[in-house]
Image (cartoon, rainbow, N blue to C red):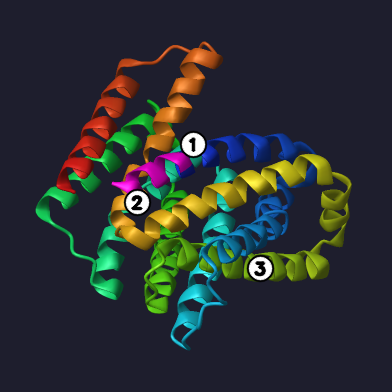
């Protein structure tokens, strides 16, 4: 059950990273704040890899050719997914779009079966569907559907699809290494992926909006901590991907919504509605079913 522990740590760290990125949005904008996770994250990923190599005594992993299409696919899909999610934020019906983004675990289960041959048992399928429905119930506010448009629906679904394909790409890369040390393969894949993403987004911003890069450089202190939390969260996502199916990991990751609900209720003192309680119950039941399925 190590994969479950890794996923819970990753979800908690990602919640903290998201909070930090929201603080940076005011000065860097949404694209700049998003780039922070890659630009300031990859040095920490390299340090993680160096630490693993030193502690284990292993040499640099032999990388087969089949590894590179998987890792490039995963890295590019994650960037695309983030861009689509940012686009959804600009929609009036963002809440609806966000609910569709959270169909990711269902899509991960489907793509995992198609591309990786990950077995989906009836119990696992039920857990994925129940937990996903719970998150959608929490996300959809009364009356939100009135502002829903075909555009916002498509953006949400496509973002969820891109996030799902990204998870499949990363898990495919990890499996293609075929090494017994799952910590090494996960950390190596994380470092390679973050270096690729940092390079691609830096090149994009340098060509399209160099002012954002200058703003990021000025805000290096808070960005450094946000980058560390991003790399830390990703490290545990990848460790989980190395020993469990992507569908299981991404379904359990829905507990992030429960963390957000807890922060909203206890920290911001906002009341929890009966609808939200019903959604939380479904998420918890789906997660328990998922763990039982293992």
The answer to whether one can see residue 93 in this image is no
Residue beneath label 2, please?
Answer: 249
Q: Is residue 78 above or below residue 17?
A: below
Q: Earlier in the sequence, mark 1 or mark 3?
A: 1
Report the magenta residues as a range.
1-9
Q: Confirm whether the magenta stretch covers residue 247.
A: no
Residue at x 50% of width, y 83% of height? 62
Rendered location of residue 14, percent (x, y) = 53, 42
Query: SS at mark 3?
Result: helix
Q: Is residue 86 left or right of residue 258?
A: right
Residues marked 3 and 2 touching at CB (< 8 Å): no
Residue at x 13% of width, y 56% of height? 121
Query: SS at mark 1?
Result: helix
Q: Earlier in the sequence, mark 2 or mark 1?
A: 1
The answer to whether one can see residue 242 in this image is yes
Q: Nearer the viewer, residue 65 or 56?
A: 56
User: Looking at the rendered structure, which numbered label has been put on residue 195?
Assistant: 3
Q: Nearer the viewer, residue 7 or 210?
A: 7
């Amino acid at each position: 059950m190590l994969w479950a522990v890794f996923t819970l740590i990753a979800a908690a760290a990602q919640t903290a990273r998201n909070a930090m990125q929201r603080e940076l949005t005011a000065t860097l904008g949404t694209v700049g704040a998003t780039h922070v996770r890659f630009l300031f994250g990859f040095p920490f990923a390299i340090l993680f890899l160096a630490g693993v190599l030193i502690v284990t005594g292993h040499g640099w992993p032999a990388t087969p050719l089949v590894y590179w299409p998987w890792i490039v696919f995963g890295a590019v899909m994650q960037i695309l997914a983030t861009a689509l999610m940012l686009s959804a934020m600009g929609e009036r019906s963002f809440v609806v779009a966000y609910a569709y983004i959270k169909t990711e675990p269902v899509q991960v289960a489907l793509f995992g079966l198609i591309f990786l041959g990950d077995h989906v048992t009836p119990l696992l399928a039920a857990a994925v569907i129940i937990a996903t429905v719970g998150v959608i119930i929490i996300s959809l506010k009364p009356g939100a559907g009135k502002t829903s448009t075909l555009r916002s629906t498509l953006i949400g679904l496509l973002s969820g699809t891109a996030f799902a394909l990204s998870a499949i790409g990363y898990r495919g890369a990890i499996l293609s290494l075929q090494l017994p040390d799952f910590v090494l393969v996960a950390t190596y894949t994380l470092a390679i992926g973050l270096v690729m993403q940092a390079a691609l987004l830096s090149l994009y911003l340098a060509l399209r909006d160099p002012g954002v890069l200058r703003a990021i450089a000025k805000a290096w202190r808070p960005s450094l901590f946000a980058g560390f939390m991003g790399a830390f969260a990703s490290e545990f996502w990848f460790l989980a991907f190395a020993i469990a199916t992507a569908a299981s990991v991404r379904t359990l990751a829905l507990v992030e919504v429960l963390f957000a609900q807890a922060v909203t209720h206890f920290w911001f003192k906002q009341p929890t509605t009966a609808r939200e309680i019903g959604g939380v119950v479904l998420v918890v039941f789906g997660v328990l079913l998922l763990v039982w399925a293992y």
